Amino acid sequence: PETGCLSIIVLGASGDLAKKKTFPALFNLYCQGFLPPDEVHIFGYARTKISDDDLRNRVCGYLVNDRSASPSEDVSKFLQLIQYVSGSYDGADGFQLLDKEITKHEISKSSQEGSSRRLFYLALPPSVYPSVCRMIRKYCMNKSDLGGWTRIVVEKPFGKDLDSAEQLSSQIGELFDEPQIYRIDHYLGKELVQNLLVLRFANRFFLPLWNRDNIDNVQIVFREDFGTEGRGGYFDEYGIIRDIIQNHLLQVLCLVAMEKPVSLKPEHIRDEKVKVLQSVLPIKDEEVVLGQYEGYRDDPTVPNHSNTPTFATVILRIHNERWEGVPFILKAGKALNSRKAEIRVQFKDVPGDIFKCQKQGRNEFVIRLQPSEAMYMKLTVKQPGLEMSTVQSELDLSYRQRYQGVTIPEAYERLILDTIRGDQQHFVRRDELKAAWEIFTPLLHRIDHGEMKPIPYRTGSRGPAEADELSAKAGYVQTHGY
Ligand code: BG6
């Protein structure tokens, strides 16, 4: 591993993302020894004029760690690594000052042999990405003779449609090369999402079955049991398709559907993901159901006549040899009856069924990403007892039981470590982003122009009944019990 000075600069340090995700992830990495204090310094940067201690106090409340033996001692040591610099997002002064502070720290650590590394984490709204990137490029690049690097981490939303995303990509692309840009989709940092490649390509069970001959349909579902609480302003501009489906669920779809990569090299994996995205057919209006929960417009930051969907079911069809005819049902919603993210791969009925058991349900392979990570296979077995009757049961791998005592890392923790190590496998490449926007832009424009309307649904429900009807029409058979 590389050694030498590492400066992590969190821009937008006083914002929500930084407090809730970025700093806690850095803290967890620190507690596990990935951020050695003799090499690492953390800078918070934002417009607010506050002191180092103010920032430390703000961050402190969000630091929870279940791994370390003496949490409070770790917290105070970690907080000592954080320094605050205030400045604007488009003015030279702030960034010159930031560079001066980073350089000071690099000089103070210069007894260490090695290169200097600068990681800029943009926990900011995308509207300021271009100016911030320009300032970093102009004033804050790594200058060490011993080598090293400058990398930037950006978060979605990357644009609002194909054109705006491409414009943003070009603006950033003029300043940084692709290997310097880390576009986070935090779903790629989740344990069971990272497990998909292993499951699919390291198990003989799945290899021959993973295709249109055996699989009837695939559902990728995201549910939240709370509304847009406090984020109504942001959410209303984007809606559920831009917030969840175009990125998180589509990334999962890529990993479920892609062909085997040549190797595990990030570029090989990302090449295969792009091919899947490019094979998706245009979305048909009749394969979309939109919803909006009742009460959404009561949020004072949401316009009274908002047409923004808080729920959507969209069927994607992949035009290739493996998947022709298999619907991928993507479903996401806020203010529903439960909080869950899962992948359901439903197999076709057994031909020539002699047990007449088909009504009990089909074979289904479920990967639950959260909560309580698990994988289970629904299968038909003989009902124990004297009669020859059948029943649906499960082969169940529940992580909590199987991996007792193992802490599953937070998505952000893993992804930030990847950025330090220079591994781009779990980050979205520019052409991948473009292909993802190509799929959804026509639909999004129709919604934006009011040509498609969300159906109201009750808070705490399953969403509009029309969505279940659409899934059933696409071939999904609801099974009960598990
Ligand atoms: C974010 C969305 O990207 O993901 C939020 O902007 C959503 O609206 C969140 O709540 C869900 O993430 P997780 O990891 O809790 O499923």
Image (tube, rainbow, N blue to C red):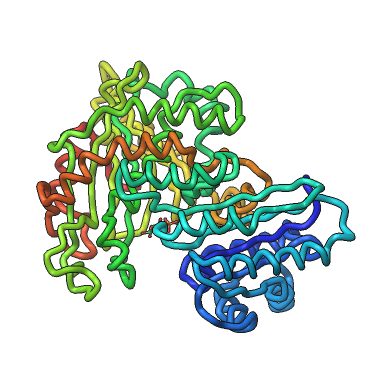
Residue 432's spot in the image, x, y percent? 43, 35
Name the quadrant of the N terminus.
top right
Left or right position of 286 against 334 = left
Q: Where is 291 relative to 467, above or below?
A: below
Residue 80's spot in the image, x, y percent? 72, 75
Q: Nearer the viewer, residue 417 or 287?
A: 417
Q: Where is 136 relative to 55, above or below?
A: above
Residue 474's spot in the image, x, y percent? 20, 33
The quarter of the rendering in which ligand 1 is drawn is bottom left
- Can you see residue 429? yes
Q: Residue at 42% across / 40% down in the picture?
A: 251
Residue 8 picture quarter: bottom right
Q: Nearer the viewer, residue 10 or 222?
A: 10
Residue 350 picture quarter: top left
Q: Where is 200 relative to 246, above or below?
A: above
Q: Residue at 30% across / 34% down in the picture?
A: 328
Left or right position of 246 against 406 = left
Q: Nearer the viewer, residue 245 or 396?
A: 245
Q: Residue at 38% across / 37% down in the picture?
A: 434
- Can you see residue 387? no
Residue 261's spot in the image, x, y percent? 53, 24
Left or right position of 477 against 255 = left
Q: Nearer the viewer, residue 358 or 457?
A: 457
Residue 315 picture quarter: top left
Q: How many marks?
A: 0
Q: Where is 93 relative to 146, above or below?
A: below
Left or right position of 267 against 298 = right
